[in-house]
Image: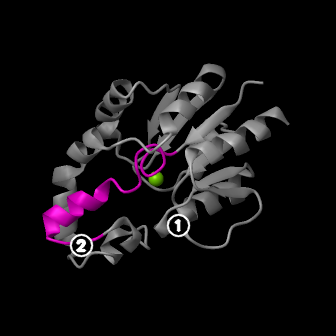
Amino acid sequence: MKRKFGIDIDGTVTCPATIVPYLNEAFHLNLTFDDFKEYDWLQVIDVSENEFNDWYLRNEANIYMESPLASGAKEVLLEWGRDHDLVFISARGEELLQITKDWFIRHGLPYHHIELIGTHQKVEAAKKYAVEIFLEDKYDNAIDIYNHCHIPVILFNTPYNQGPLPNKIKRVFSWKEAKIWVDKWISH
Ligand SMILES: [Mg+2]
């Protein structure tokens, strides 16, 4: 049966540690991925909000172009993309759509639709596209989507998304594990 997937991009399809070397270089830090216990990078680095936002606006396009894939993501997405609709729903700004599509094409990733909503409020988009399952890396997004859409959510484990989860949100440690869980869900 054909299913409709909602899938986050950054930290889910892209490697969640992507930002670390950029921050280290820009702000002369020596952080490791394990230091990122908060989703909000400003809680981790000691830089003013203005300085950080200036830097981010100047660099985000480049970071998104160069982001490495999350380990194992491509193989799984290629397989799901053959039988199902993959709708990517991201907090990136709409102006980054071309860069984002180019990145998908360059990496040979299938997509049915890419929706850049420019905000972390993903519930509306998840409802609009009637996705039946969601894959995320942001803890409060996972909780929100589950609470408002009543669909299973896969949360890719990272240092910044720890916390208790309801039963219908499945924490996974790899794309391989996600595939096993989702394939079982599809077959039921
Ligand atoms: Mg994300």
Label 1 is placed on what type of residue?
A: Asn
- Left or right, 149 with respect to 159, comes to right
* Residue 121 in the image, given as x and y percentages of width and height: 51, 55
Which part of the image, by quadrant, shows the C terminus? top right
Q: Nearer the viewer, residue 48 or 171?
A: 171
Query: Which quarter of the figure has residue 109?
Result: top left
Magenta stretch bounds: 8-31
| Up-down relation of residue 99 to residue 32 (above or below) | above
Q: Give residue 47's position: percent from left, percent from top.
A: 20, 76
CB at disc 1 and ligand 1 closer than 8 Å? no
- Residue at image position (30%, 57%) is 19
Residue that label 2 marks: 49
Helix, strand or loop for disc 1: helix
Residue 20: quarter of image: bottom left
Direction bottom: furthest residue: 46
Report the residue marked by disc 1: 161
Q: Is mark 2 within 8 Å of ligand 1?
A: no
Extreme residue toward the top, this view: 82
At a point 26% along the width and 39% down the height, the residue shown is 65
Residue 186 in the image, given as x and y percentages of width and height: 77, 35
